[in-house]
Amino acid sequence: MTTTMIFAGSGGQGIQFSGKQIAKSGMYAGYQVTFLPSYGPEMRGGTSNCTVVISDEEIGSPSVVSPDIAVVMNKPSFEKFAPRVQAGGKLFLDSTLIDLTTDREDISVIPVPATTLAEENGLNGFSNVILMGKIIKETGLFKYEDFVEYLVASIPPAKAALIEKNTKALELGYNYTV
Amino acid sequence: MAKKVLMKGNEAIAEAAISVGCIHFFGYPITPQTEVAEYLAKRLPKVGGLCLQAESEVAAINMTLGAAAAGTRVMTSSSSPGISLKSEGISYIAGSDLPCLIVNVQRGGPGLGGIQPSQADYYQATRGVGHGDLRLIVLAPSSVQEMASLTAQALDLADIYRMPAMLLADGALGQMMEPVDFSAFPKRDVPEKTWATVGHNNARPHNIVNSLYIDPQVLEDSVKARYQRYAEVEKNEVQYEEFMTDDADIVLVAFGITARICKSAVTAARAAGIKAGLLRPITLWPFPKDAISAAADHAKALMSVEMSMGQMVDDVRLAVNGKKPVYFYGRTGGMIPSVEEVTKEICSLANAL
């Protein structure tokens, strides 16, 4: 079983962090994983994306054209990746920032007003983690408790103050229903 | 779970180098390999080493020459245009019989080209990395784990054969993250560097490191002696991996990141009833010509797949020596071929055979 994912949004939204965290969690859970970031000028703003592959077999290409799952956090990324999601796949989006719709009926579209939820709960800057919560819930890639453990484990001691906000944001996304 | 860490390929090169005692680095930043120097700049001062950002690639390669002459384990790292700048120094290092590691995390070319992954420096690495009769040992990793393990190997091989070794990677391998295990690099016996130009209180005659021989006979003799060592490398150090080649009608030949894509394509082609296989050179020099020649005995055709306009395909044809047709498929300029397009190439070749 191989799951391919693309995370895309604006530089600074934590796109790379989300992808890296999911990849790291896959490694902790005993899967083969690859994480391939876009690199270059996007590091300094503009669009940013990364590709994650999680598999129980050896992974061939780390680069993916049509992912099983796309997570988009701005309009250009929605426009670019909504058409590319595999039939039967899932499209997660921050519906605070993206008011676009797709006419595709062969994929599940999962809108989460992540930016609004973050602002309302004193979690500015954690909208990516809120989305991650929803991804864990909807994909069943990881057990929730395991994922919390992996998330906490990857926060360095110097940033221990961020543990609470991360876990709170994750829980918020995990429990979010329309 | 504890042993593996998720790391960028560039960081894995750096950590592996430190772990086998290569604690001197000279370089100049260039995308997509800058994390090598970034990582070493943080780590080397803590382990008693030196990471120096030179004023240019030309300076960095000549500092590498100097450190190698002093008998230290040393490396430099760059990406395609930067390697071109280093080529004079690399020739001097080869001509001086000095061991070192040169890392090329390739990007698209020619010229300033682009910053996305490429394999179009194959000719440069295996043919024309500097003037004169010379060879580099060229290793081509295809995973982040191999970015680490082949870095360690390259440093050993350079020391054993007293010659420069190159790790030929690409931007995708440099930037991507995968789990890496640093616990088990096989160690080789490495000879003592009795030729190093270090202080000795006049206890022995001076050692001289030099690549200038005015007398042509002396120069010819020195080149011939070096080529005897090259022959040893060709005899002893060829490495490759075979995947489903035993009964394959179509054998793909691919290295680095492209080999992974080809592996997935071979699996897809097999699922469609086509007997495909993959031969992946791990050493590009010495090239696994005997293995490719053997594959050509039972396959109906071979296809070299590369991120270039077709460079390694020349070596595949030389190895096959006309026994079977050799085809080529490639993307260039920073484009990575997709599994789907390579699978399609295999299918249309199968139909044509």
Image (cartoon, coloured by chain):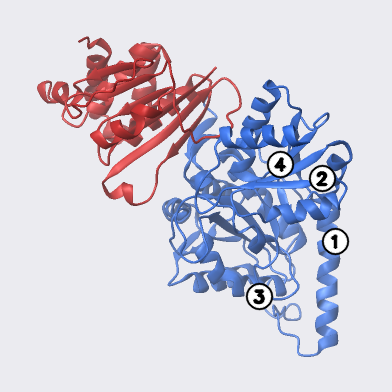
Chain colours: A red, B blue
Amino acid type of disc 3? Tyr
Q: Nearer the viewer, mark 4 or mark 3?
A: 3
Establish if B66 lies above or below B142. below
In the rendered structure, find residue B92 and report the number of the disc placed on it: 3
In the rendered structure, find residue B292 and report the number of the disc placed on it: 2
Q: Secondary structure at mark 4?
A: loop
CA gap, disc 3 and disc 2: 32 Å
Quarter of the image that includes the C terminus of chain B: top right
Mark 4 vs mark 3: tell me if same chain: yes
Q: Label 3 is found on which chain of the structure? A: B
Establish if B145 lies above or below B52. above
**Along the horizontal axis of the image, is A12 left or right of B56?**
left
Residue sitting at 58 percent across and 50 percent down?
B169
In the rendered structure, find residue B186 and report the number of the disc placed on it: 4
CA gap, disc 1 and disc 3: 20 Å
Amino acid type of disc 2? Ile
**Along the horizontal axis of the image, is B9 left or right of B296?**
left
Q: Nearer the viewer, mark 1 or mark 4?
A: 1
CA gap, disc 2 and disc 1: 19 Å
Q: Quarter-wise, where is residue B243 in the image? A: top right
Q: Is B337 in front, or is A14?
A: B337
The reply to whether discs 2 and 1 touch (Cβ–Cβ < 8 Å) is no
| Label 2 packing within 10 angstroms: few (<14), some (14-19), many (20+) | many
Q: Nearer the viewer, mark 4 or mark 2?
A: 2
Residue under circle 1? B231
Q: Is B196 in front, or is B125?
A: B125
Q: Is B191 in front, or is B231?
A: B231
CA gap, disc 4 and disc 2: 26 Å
The reply to whether discs 3 and 2 touch (Cβ–Cβ < 8 Å) is no
Amino acid type of disc 4? Pro
